[in-house]
Image (spheres, rainbow, N blue to C red):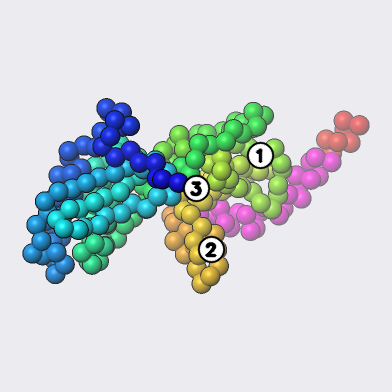
C-alpha cells in the first residue's frame, strides 16, 4: 500500500503548509554541522525537499543525494514548538554527518515523539469518572503534568477512578485509549494525597515512555523510567507509606466495610 503523505501538495490545508522557517532551519543546521564532519564537507546543498506523514510509527528521516536533502517528518511537526523543530533537525542531521547527538536535543525529540498518540482514542465507559468522594484525579493529574511533564498535551491523556477496587495493582495505563485508571481503594481520607500523586505520576510515565526491549526482553520499568519516577518530590514518602502503612490501612478498611455491612443488615 502506498504511503499516505502530505508533502507540499493541495492535501495540506493552507494553515498546515510547511513553513519556510523549517527549510531555513534545516539549511542553517546543515551549514553548522558540515564544518564539524568530513562527510559532505565539499558538497553544495542545492535543494531541500520535505514530506509529512500522519501516522505515528513512520520514521522521521533525512537523506542526502546529489545536492538534494530529502526529509520525512510526522505531520505534527508542522505545528510543533520551534525548539522541537530545531532539536529534530540537529538529531537527524547529526546522524547524517556521523556526529554525536547532543543529549538535550535527543531528549527534546523523544518527548515530542512520545506525545504523539498512536491513534484516535477509543471511547471509555461513561460510568467512569475522575471525581471521587475525596480526591479529584483531574486536579491531581493537572498538578503533576504542570510540575513534571509540561510538554505532555493533556488532551492526549485521560484519567478515571477504576470500576474495580484493586488492592495490589493501584493504577494502570491503557495505550489504546490513552487512559489511566486508579484503584478507588486510594479514594479515602486516610490515604495521603502524595500517595495518590505518586501513583498518578507513575502511570503518566507509562504514557510518555514506550516499552523497550532490553537483552531480548520487554522492559516495562526501564532504567530511565526508574530515574524519572524518583523525580517526584515525595517519592520516598509515598513508597514508605505503601510499604509500612498501606497493609494496616487495608486491614482497617476491611473491618470498616464489614461493620457497615452488619449495620446495614
| Residue pointed to by mark 1 | 162
Q: CA distance from mark 1 to mark 2?
A: 25 Å
Disc 3 is placed on an element classified as helix
Of the two numbered discs 1 and 2 in the rendering, the one whose residue sits closer to the viewer: 2
Q: Is residue 32 above or below residue 51?
A: below
Disc 2 is placed on an element classified as strand
Residue 152: x %, y % from top left: 41, 42
Q: Which mark is residue 39?
A: none
Is residue 50 shown in magenta?
no
Q: Which residues are magenta?
A: 233-258
Q: Which mark is residue 207?
A: 3
Precedes in sequence: disc 3 or disc 1 = 1
Residue 187: x %, y % from top left: 64, 39
Is residue 237 shown in magenta?
yes
Q: CA distance from mark 3 to mark 1?
A: 17 Å
Name the residue rendered at 66%, 51% in the picture.
169
Density class for disc 3 (Cα within 10 Å; few <14, some 14-19, many ≥20) is: many
Residue extending furthest toward the front: 1
Residue extending furthest toward the right: 265
Q: CA distance from mark 2 to mark 3?
A: 14 Å
| Residue pointed to by mark 2 | 219
Q: Main secondary structure of the magenta part?
A: helix
Name the residue rendered at 45%, 34% in the picture.
155
Amino acid at each position: 500500500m502506498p504511503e499516505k503523505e502530505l508533502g507540499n501538495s493541495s492535501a495540506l490545508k493552507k494553515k498546515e503548509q510547511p513553513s519556510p522557517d523549517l527549510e531555513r532551519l534545516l539549511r542553517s543546521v546543515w551549514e553548522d554541522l558540515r564544518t564539524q564532519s568530513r562527510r559532505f564537507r565539499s558538497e553544495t546543498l542545492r535543494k531541500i525537499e520535505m514530506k509529512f506523514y500522519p501516522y505515528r510509527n513512520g520514521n522521521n528521516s533525512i537523506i542526502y543525494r546529489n545536492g538534494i536533502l530529502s526529509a520525512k517528518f510526522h505531520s505534527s511537526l508542522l505545528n510543533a514548538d520551534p525548539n522541537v523543530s530545531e532539536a529534530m533537525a540537529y538529531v537527524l542531521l547529526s546522524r547524517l554527518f556521523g556526529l554525536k547527538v547532543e543529549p538535550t536535543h535527543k531528549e527534546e525529540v523523544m518527548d515530542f515523539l512520545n506525545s504523539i498518540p498512536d491513534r484516535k482514542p477509543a471511547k471509555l465507559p461513561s460510568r467512569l469518572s475522575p471525581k471521587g468522594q475525596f480526591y479529584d484525579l483531574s486536579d491531581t493529574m493537572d498538578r503533576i503534568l504542570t510540575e513534571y511533564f509540561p510538554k505532555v498535551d493533556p488532551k492526549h491523556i485521560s484519567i478515571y477512578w477504576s470500576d474495580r477496587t484493586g488492592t495490589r495493582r493501584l493504577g494502570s495505563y491503557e495505550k489504546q485509549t490513552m487512559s489511566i485508571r486508579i484503584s478507588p481503594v486510594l479514594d479515602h481520607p486516610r490515604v495521603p494525597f502524595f500517595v495518590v500523586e505518586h501513583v498518578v505520576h507513575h502511570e503518566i510515565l507509562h504514557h510518555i515512555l514506550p516499552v523497550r526491549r532490553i537483552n531480548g526482553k520487554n522492559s516495562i520499568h526501564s532504567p530511565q523510567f526508574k530515574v524519572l519516577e524518583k523525580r517526584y518530590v515525595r517519592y520516598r514518602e509515598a513508597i514508605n507509606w505503601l510499604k509500612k502503612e498501606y497493609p494496616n490501612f487495608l486491614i482497617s478498611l476491611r473491618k470498616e466495610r464489614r461493620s457497615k455491612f452488619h449495620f446495614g443488615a
